[in-house]
């Protein structure tokens, strides 16, 4: 079994004007594909050749401190997983907000949706260098956090609910150095709160 590049859940131009078709074609078709291809090359002929992407990330994370060969595998596998989660974290532009149980948890933990949006924007714009801004569930509490480079909450106890990519290749063709403009568009117009809600309900299920 080889890891496959997931299909985008929308057309390349579906996120315009906030993310262009050119950016999606490059980001998904070149950057994401390169991570997937590298993972397949690195695991070929090893016991991880038939593992799921999540299992590869977990194994590489556990072993990279003592096995240098696991470092590039972790970086590429985690990037492949983060990107797949990122595509699912967005939807075509339109009014969208947390609903139901997630909205109630947002009010309890952040005081309301506007405060959560502000926290996501601050985490995404404040991340130094390349990385990711996440909404996670941590011990039953919603938190906004950020990770650098390929790091992912998938390797810890936090449950990711949605993510914003803040590597430059996610926004530079459209916004150049204006990361905040990209982040504002994603947070205010593109985040898929139904996806986050489903992740929240699964994480909270007995």
Image: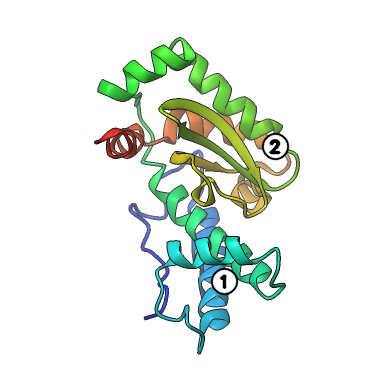
**Mark 1 or 2: the one toward you:** 2
- Picture residue at 49% right of the left edge, 50% below the top: 154
Q: Position of residue 34 (x, y in %)?
A: 57, 71
Give how far apart the Cα atoms at labels 1 and 2 are.
Answer: 24 Å
Q: Residue at x 51, y 71 (%)?
A: 36
Query: What's the residue at 62%, 37% (across, down)?
Result: 146
From the viewer's perspective, tell me whether residue 206 is left or right of residue 38: left
Looking at the image, residue 14 lies above or below residue 27: above
Q: Nearer the viewer, residue 105 or 194?
A: 105
* Residue 106 horizontal side relative to residue 36, left or right: left
Crowding at mark 1 (Cα within 10 Å: few <14, some 14-19, many 20+)? some
User: Residue placed at 47% from the left, 78% from the top?
Assistant: 48
Give the residue at mark 1: 34
Q: Which residue is mark 2?
A: 127
Question: In the rendered image, which quarter contains the C terminus?
Answer: top left
- Residue 56 placement (x, y as % from top left): 49, 68
């Amino acid at each position: 079994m080889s890891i496959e590049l997931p299909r985008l859940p929308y057309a390349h131009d579906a996120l315009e004007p906030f993310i262009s078709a050119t950016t999606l074609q490059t980001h998904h078709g070149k950057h994401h594909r390169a991570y997937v291809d590298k993972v397949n090359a690195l695991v070929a002929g090893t016991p991880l050749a038939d593992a799921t992407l999540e299992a590869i990330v977990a194994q590489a994370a556990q072993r990279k401190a003592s096995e240098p060969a696991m470092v590039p595998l972790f970086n590429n596998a985690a990037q492949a997983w983060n990107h797949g989660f990122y595509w699912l974290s967005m939807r075509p532009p339109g009014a969208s907000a947390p609903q139901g149980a997630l909205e109630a948890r947002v009010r309890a933990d952040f005081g309301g949706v506007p405060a959560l949006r502000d926290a996501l924007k601050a985490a995404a714009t404040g991340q130094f260098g390349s990385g990711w801004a996440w909404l996670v569930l941590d011990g039953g509490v919603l938190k906004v956090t950020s990770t650098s480079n390929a790091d992912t909450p998938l390797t810890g106890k936090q449950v990711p609910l949605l993510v914003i990519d803040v590597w430059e290749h996610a926004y530079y063709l459209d916004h150049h150095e204006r990361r905040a403009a990209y982040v504002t568009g994603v947070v205010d117009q593109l985040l898929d709160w139904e996806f986050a809600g489903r992740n929240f309900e699964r994480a909270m299920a007995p």
